[in-house]
């Protein structure tokens, strides 16, 4: 098998990097992403490693960039991201970057401080302006109060509206009722200079006693407000220019700084020889990519200007290498499905290539609809054809990113759904009559009614039963898929229940047998004959004797009974249960074929014999190997592991076969939801043929389309996706 079907062969290599070339060499290795560095200083504290200061400087630059990014987002300025992958700066360029970020941070902090002070002053003057206006109004409208109370004094200020009731009660108690309170709302919104929120503060302001003095003060306040507004506008314009300039390069800066930090973090994993002129590193790398790694080392050495080449030596190691599966943009989504359950051992068979077919097919069995599959395919094609432009836009929406990452999975799910929709002959809950039904409803003689069917018979009877045993009723099978006449049959659900339930069992057993068969290639590759003879063979025999036999019975029943004898066909479920109970005297369920009792009894005995073969015989063989000096494992742990594996496998064969019935359940649920949506929504718009009915149809079709996308495509599609995921796991 090629490397596509098995994890890559890995090797441990030792790198000798000259000190002046180490930075550039690690940078080039990071760009190709084909090596995994080992930590050669596991006992050294992270704060005591050689390049800890450089890592701290990179973290400080990253902090400053995050501050700049926060200010850019606060100002609602779009950050430019062209998808550029800039080269990592040289170590000598770090000082220039630090100076640039320091200057930008200080400039923004100074602008923010000045702007906050100006806004605070502006807020105070605005509040004072409103106070002077309100107090001038109060004096004019209450001039009689001056004659009645010549010695009164007043205090003016601003307070939050929600605190007015508390403020009134406090004044009443302190002044013992000798107080006159007048309040007026400030209609203009006031901005907090610190947070930018629209708030109102409680503030006291000096207010002259005479109207003339208040008038003069109000004129001065208005003039100062105009001057402050102009300065604030200029400050904001300057801040916008600084942030807009930073928004063009902040993403590139982030990439450069984080690449530098990653390089220095990697260099901290290396050892330094006694001469302090060479760094020693150990890496895991694919054997097939050694030439690319050597070329990257040469490129890094040339870029650094060093004259001493870097050296790569392959090493022998007894450690288990890491598992590495190469992927591309098409296979990465399916590999993620496999890796989400667990990453296989080194050099094991990789299930991801087979998942490319089995996953969308099992999804489509549950989601089989020609119309819905077409819509899903079109949506996925849009993502695939415009992937370059969509990747350049860098959408931060998590849901969209998840869907975009699985665009090829969705594309295949849609294509397979179209195929199963043709098999089910289901398009938005309606059947397509492309080749003419295999059932004939032409006027014919029916002995049950003692005469011929007429067109009047068809028109006056809502329910008529077509008997395939009668001559001329059943002409032959539909060329592809299910006959469209079942769409109007009253026993449609009964027929589809039987068909889809048996289909689910067949697909489930084939899928499980295929999964067990893959283990054979692993046993052959790792040269473990014991796992073949006492593991794989008993497992495959156990499943084939029971559930493989059930699949054979399904096909046998389909082929052995026709329209005339189907009424006498025995139940497969009861026959399968009686097989385990060795009950062959059931008068309600006769035998399917001659010699059924002997064959089924033999199969059950063979299946039961496989259990001690896996559980006892293999454990005894392992014990013998352990006693004869093979110390490659702990026998107690191996015995427990074998017992757990055997019990789990035998029980799993039963429970997993039943679990595949979800293919039947979700397929029927999807079909019924689609039919209910058509009959309860779309049928309303098609009930009238007048002009008003056309307008009603447009409105109803809009509702039908929204519900179809929201319920049947998104919700049902997600449900079928999760169930297909569970079956593969």
Image (cartoon, rainbow, N blue to C red):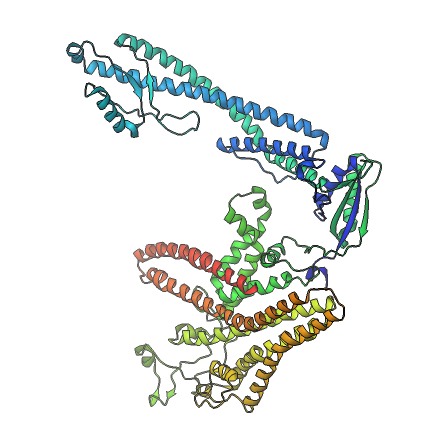
Q: Is residue 129 visible?
A: yes
Image location (x, y in percent) of residue 160: 32, 27
Residue 94: % across, % down: 68, 30
Relative to 661, is 709 above or below? above
Q: Quadrant of residue 674?
A: bottom left
Q: Total of numbered circles in the picture?
A: 0
Quadrant position of the N terminus in the picture: bottom right
Can residue 480 be seen? no
**Above or below, comparing residue 15 to residue 703 in the picture:** above
Query: For the point 43% across and 74% down, which residue is it?
Result: 486
Name the residue located 54 percent from the left edge and 83 percent from the top edge.
556
Q: Nearer the viewer, residue 365 or 120?
A: 120
Residue 698 rendering spot, x and y as whole percentages: 36, 55
- Of 215 and 559, nearer the camera is 215
As displayed, is residue 603 above or below residue 622?
Answer: below
Q: Is residue 559 left or right of residue 540?
A: left
Screen quadrant of the C terminus: bottom right
Left or right of 251 in this view: 212: left
Give left or right: position of 513 versus 560: right
Residue extending farthest to the right is 307
Coordinates of residue 72 in the picture (x, y in percent)? 52, 31
Give the quarter of the image for residue 514: bottom right
Residue found at the far front of this picture: 627
Q: Residue at x 37, y 25 (%)?
A: 190
């Amino acid at each position: 098998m090629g490397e596509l079907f098995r994890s890559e062969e890995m090797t441990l290599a030792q790198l000798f990097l000259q000190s002046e070339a180490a930075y550039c060499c690690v940078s080039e290795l990071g760009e190709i992403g084909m090596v995994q560095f080992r930590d050669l200083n596991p006992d050294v504290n992270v704060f005591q490693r050689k390049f800890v200061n450089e890592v701290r400087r990179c973290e400080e630059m990253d902090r400053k960039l995050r501050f700049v990014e926060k200010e850019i987002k606060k100002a609602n300025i779009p950050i430019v991201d062209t998808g550029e992958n800039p080269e990592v700066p040289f170590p000598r360029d770090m000082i220039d970057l630090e100076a640039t970020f320091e200057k930008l941070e200080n400039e923004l902090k100074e602008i923010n401080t000045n702007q906050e002070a100006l806004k605070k002053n502006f807020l105070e003057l605005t509040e004072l302006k409103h106070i002077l206006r309100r107090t001038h109004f109060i004096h004019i409208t209450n001039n009689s109060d001056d004659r009645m109370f010549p010695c009164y004094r007043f205090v003016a200020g601003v307070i939050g509206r929600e605190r007015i009731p508390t403020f009134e009660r406090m004044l009443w108690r302190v002044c013992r009722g000798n107080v006159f309170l007048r309040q007026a709302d400030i209609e203009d919104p006031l901005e907090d200079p610190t947070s930018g929120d629209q708030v109102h503060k409680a503030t006291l302001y000096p207010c002259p006693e005479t109207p003339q003095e208040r008038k003069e003060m109000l004129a001065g306040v208005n003039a100062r407000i105009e001057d402050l507004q102009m300065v604030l506008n200029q400050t904001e314009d300057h801040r916008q220019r600084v942030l807009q300039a930073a928004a063009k390069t902040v993403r590139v800066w982030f990439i450069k700084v984080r690449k530098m930090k990653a390089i220095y973090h990697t260099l901290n994993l290396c050892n330094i020889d006694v001469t302090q002129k060479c760094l020693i590193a150990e890496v895991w790398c694919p054997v097939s990519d050694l030439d690319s790694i050597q070329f990257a080392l040469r490129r890094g050495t040339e870029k650094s200007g060093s004259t001493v080449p870097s050296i790569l030596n392959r090493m022998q190691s007894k450690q288990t290498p890491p598992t590495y599966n190469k992927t591309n943009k098409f296979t990465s989504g399916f590999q993620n499905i496999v890796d989400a359950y667990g990453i296989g051992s080194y050099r094991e068979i990789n299930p991801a290539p087979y998942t490319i077919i089995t996953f969308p097919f099992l999804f489509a069995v549950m989601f089989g609809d020609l119309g819905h599959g077409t819509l899903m395919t079109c949506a996925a094609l849009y993502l695939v054809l415009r992937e370059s432009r969509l990747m350049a836009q860098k959408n931060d929406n998590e849901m969209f990113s998840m869907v975009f990452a699985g665009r090829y999975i969705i594309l295949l799910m849609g294509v397979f759904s179209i195929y199963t929709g043709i098999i089910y002959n289901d398009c938005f809950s309606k059947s397509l009559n492309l080749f003419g039904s295999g059932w004939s409803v032409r006027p014919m003689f029916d002995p049950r009614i003692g005469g011929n069917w007429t067109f009047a018979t068809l028109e006056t009877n809502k329910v008529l039963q077509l008997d395939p045993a009668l001559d001329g009723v059943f002409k032959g099978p539909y060329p592809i898929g299910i006959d469209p006449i079942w769409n109007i049959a009253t026993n449609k659900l009964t027929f589809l229940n039987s068909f889809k339930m048996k289909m689910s069992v067949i697909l489930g057993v084939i899928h499980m047998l295929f999964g067990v068969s893959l283990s054979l290639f692993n046993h052959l590759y790792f040269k473990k004959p014991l796992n073949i003879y006492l593991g794989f063979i008993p497992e495959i025999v156990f499943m084939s004797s029971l559930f493989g036999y059930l699949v054979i019975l399904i096909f046998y029943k389909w082929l052995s009974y026709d329209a005339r004898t189907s009424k006498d066909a025995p139940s497969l479920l009861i026959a399968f249960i009686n097989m385990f109970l060795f009950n062959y005297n059931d008068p309600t369920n006769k035998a399917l074929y001659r010699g059924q009792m002997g064959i089924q009894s033999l199969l059950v005995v063979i299946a039961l014999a496989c259990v001690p073969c896996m559980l006892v015989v293999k454990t005894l063989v392992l014990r013998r190997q352990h006693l004869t000096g093979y110390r490659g494992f702990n026998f107690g742990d191996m015995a427990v592991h074998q017992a757990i594996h055997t019990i789990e496998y035998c029980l799993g064969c039963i429970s997993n076969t039943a679990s595949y019935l979800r293919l039947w359940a979700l397929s029927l649920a999807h079909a019924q939801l689609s039919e209910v949506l058509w009959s309860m929504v779309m049928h309303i718009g098609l009930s009238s043929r007048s002009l008003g009915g056309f307008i009603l149809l447009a409105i109803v079709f809009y509702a039908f389309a929204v519900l179809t996308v929201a319920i049947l495509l998104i919700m049902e599609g997600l449900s079928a996706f999760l169930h297909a995921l569970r079956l593969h796991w």
